[in-house]
Image: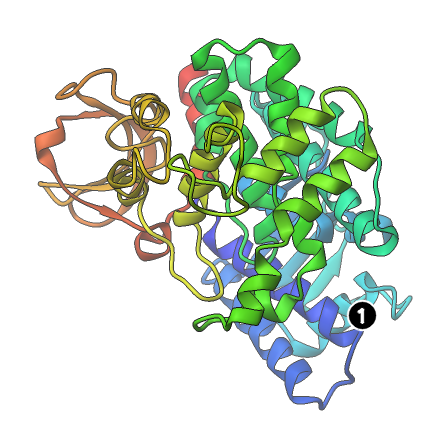
Amino acid sequence: MNERLPAAFLKALRRLVRQVGLFPVGHPLTDEAIASATDAAGDLVGDDGEVVLTVLDNAYYHNRALLPHTSLEYHVLMREMQARGVESVKLIRPVSSQDLLDLAAFIGALSDDLPADGTVLLNEVFLTASDVTSSSMEGLRASYRGSLDALRVVTGTMASQGTFELTGVIEAVEGLFETSVSHGNASLLLSTVKSHDEYTFFHSVNTCILSLAVGRLVGVDKEHLVPVGVGAVLHDIGKVAVSTAVLNYPGHLSDEQWKEITIHPQEGALAIMSAGGPGHEIAATVAFEHHARYDGSGYPRVTRDGRPHVFSRVVSISDTYDAITTRRSYRRAETPHRALQVLLSNAGSHYDPDLVRLFIRMMGLYPPGSILRVDDGSVVVVTAPSVELGAPLETLLVRDRGGSDVDPEPFEVQPDRVLGQLLPQTAGLDPASLLERLAEVEGQ
């Protein structure tokens, strides 16, 4: 199931819900949001005539197909829908702009009128657990979702009160630790989940997943590794003290802007130390040092032998890898292979060379989630790290040599057959959304 069209509709609907709460119809931004939602709804319905999006057990379903990535990225909208009693939305071609506007106003609690007898119908279709296939990946997705929620709470509390409780984050990271141990490579593939609108939250959880994986590989025990994960989740919490304009500034930063950026590590560390709790010293050290470089440069300057703590070095590598592979407001995403090249070229200066080699060995030449074009024209998605140099790549075939999407199926590819790597937006694919399908294939 390709999640691109239902995700695009939910993104447009979320924007419309926000917009109608700010500006009335007739405002240029509101009218633009209405047009975008109408176009997205039309694309989703397509030639089928009608389509149903259902909410069941913290997940979205497109008709009866689970949307795993979309369920994570648009979980906040899902909660708003659930709070208003919306269990399903049926779209009927041609979808009316007015009906979509009514839907957005209802979800946003601006109206108590349900769209009726129109092209957008609510709660006409209901699913139960027996109607859909259960997934062994739900535990991992729930842990990811719980970590996002904990980070949202902490960030909101930090912004409003200047302090926060660490308990929720610790529990969330413990959940990630347990589920990632039991799911192995699937947790690495889940770290490819991205969100442009909530970049910091998703990036922080992905950094945590990768750091936990490296820590387990090194042999760090749970007692010490969970605080490392907490530090990874909260490594950018100090950015609450930095203005949004500076964080998203597209050009070269002025000296004053750069000075504002460089305060976030110490702001985050101070907040974590104030929060207290088990392992808070380790978590605070990670937040303080995640921009300190292996050779002693970077910021802030570290006095301990001129190098950051080994736990901070682990998080720094994971932080860089996920940041490079994620689209930002001021920079396009790079491929996973390119991210590994950046780490390798800066090993010994920016990054611990031993940990870089370990990270690359863990991820493989083409990390899980890499989208590759093969020499026969087909497209595959890597599902597991390559065991050794030259070994066949474990992938899912997702597009045949004729360019048609196919149901994902296991497919081994020799590395010398790879012509190049594609970005998800270029390929029109979302690697993370293949997690559930992969689990289904392996469970058969």
* Residue 366 picture location, percent across and down: 26, 33
In the depicted structure, whether residue 330 falls above or below residue 435: below
- The residue nearer to you, when weighing 103 against 413, is 413
* Residue 30 picture location, percent across and down: 68, 81
Residue at image coords 78%, 47%: 79
Q: Is residue 407 left or right of residue 290?
A: left
Q: Is residue 370 left or right of residue 228?
A: left
Q: Is residue 224 left or right of residue 40?
A: right
In the depicted structure, whether residue 149 falls above or below residue 198: above
On the image, which quarter does residue 130 sit in?
top right
On the image, which quarter does residue 231 sit in?
top right
Secondary structure type for disc 1: helix
Amino acid type, mark 1 = Ala
The residue at which mark 1 appears reads as: 105
* Residue 223 picture location, percent across and down: 66, 11
Q: Quadrant of the N terminus?
A: top left
Q: Determine if residue 250 is in view.
A: yes
Residue at image coords 45%, 39%: 192
* Residue 61 picture location, percent across and down: 61, 42
In the depicted structure, whether residue 94 falls above or below residue 59: below
Q: Determine if residue 62 is in view.
A: no
Q: Is residue 366 left or right of residue 61?
A: left
Residue at image coords 86%, 54%: 84
- The residue nearer to you, when weighing 46 against 208, is 208
